[in-house]
């Protein structure tokens, strides 16, 4: 997927992720804060906002438990604009393959440019393709039901 920028739109908009992985992270965060996911658990938000609704319950004492719910909204920090493809150069006709002894060298893939995250331009090296970290790509913000 990284080497095919045509597939980046859904990912960069925060729409192309696995619910299982996101909810695992929510559960791990709850545990670090002496809580566990409860109620409806971790549910993907519907509508225009991308993110999750999570309900947690404290695990502090046997007699008293506090419950809280929050929405975690994914906000993209990046955009991608594919560079213009140059017009093909006019070339001479291909020689007869039987006459050619030297194979044509394979073209090196060009770096992928056009990814901008909060004003910073990123270049993806096709020989070692890596996107920026999740924290460079997105902000996750807690919101109330009315936002």
Image (cartoon, helix red, strand yellow):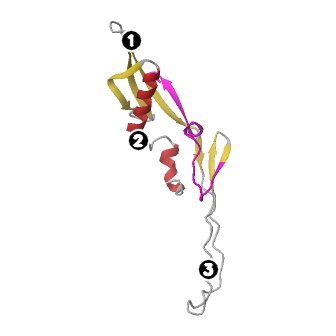
Q: Which residue is nearer to you in this view: 25 or 136?
A: 25
Identify the residue at the far bottom of this view. Answer: 99
Callout 3: helix, strand or loop? Answer: loop
- Quick one: label 3 or label 2, which is nearer the N terminus? 2
Residue tagged by mark 1?
Answer: 66
Q: Which residue is nearer to you in this view: 47 or 43?
A: 43
**Residue 41's image quarter?**
top left
**Residue 70's image quarter?**
top left
Tell me where residue 92 appears, x and y as whole percent.
65, 85
Q: Which residues are magenta?
A: 122-147
Q: Is residue 68 magenta?
A: no
- The residue drawn where x is 57% and y is 50% is 130
- The residue drawn where x is 60% and y is 73% is 106
- Label 1 vs label 2: CA separation? 29 Å
Left or right for 24, reference 7: left
- The residue drawn where x is 51% and y is 42% is 13
Tell me where residue 117 appears, x and y as whole percent.
62, 42
Callout 1: helix, strand or loop? Answer: loop
- Quick one: label 3 or label 1, which is nearer the N terminus? 1
Q: Is residue 146 visible?
A: no
Q: Is residue 56 visible?
A: yes
- Label 3 vs label 2: CA separation? 43 Å
Tell me where residue 19 appears, x and y as whole percent.
39, 38
- The residue drawn where x is 64% and y is 39% is 118
Label 2, residues with CA under 10 Å away: few <14, some 14-19, many ≥20: few
- Label 3 vs label 1: CA separation? 70 Å
Label 1, residues with CA under 10 Å away: few <14, some 14-19, many ≥20: few
Label of residue 18 in the image:
2
Left or right for 40, reference 114: left
Label of residue 107 in the image:
none
Residue tagged by mark 3?
Answer: 104
């Amino acid at each position: 997927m990284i080497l095919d920028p045509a597939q980046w739109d859904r990912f960069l908009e925060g729409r192309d992720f696995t619910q299982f992985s996101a909810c695992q992270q929510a559960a791990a965060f709850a545990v670090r804060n002496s809580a566990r996911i409860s109620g409806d658990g971790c549910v993907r938000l519907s509508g225009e906002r991308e993110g999750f609704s999570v309900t947690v319950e404290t695990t502090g004492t046997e007699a008293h438990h506090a419950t809280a719910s929050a929405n975690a909204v994914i906000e993209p920090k990046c955009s991608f604009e594919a560079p213009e493809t140059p017009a093909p150069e006019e070339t001479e006709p291909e020689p007869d393959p039987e006459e050619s002894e030297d194979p044509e060298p394979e073209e090196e893939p060009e770096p992928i440019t056009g990814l901008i995250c909060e004003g910073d331009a990123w270049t993806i090296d096709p020989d070692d393709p890596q996107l920026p970290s999740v924290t460079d790509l997105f902000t996750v913000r807690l919101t109330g039901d009315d936002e």
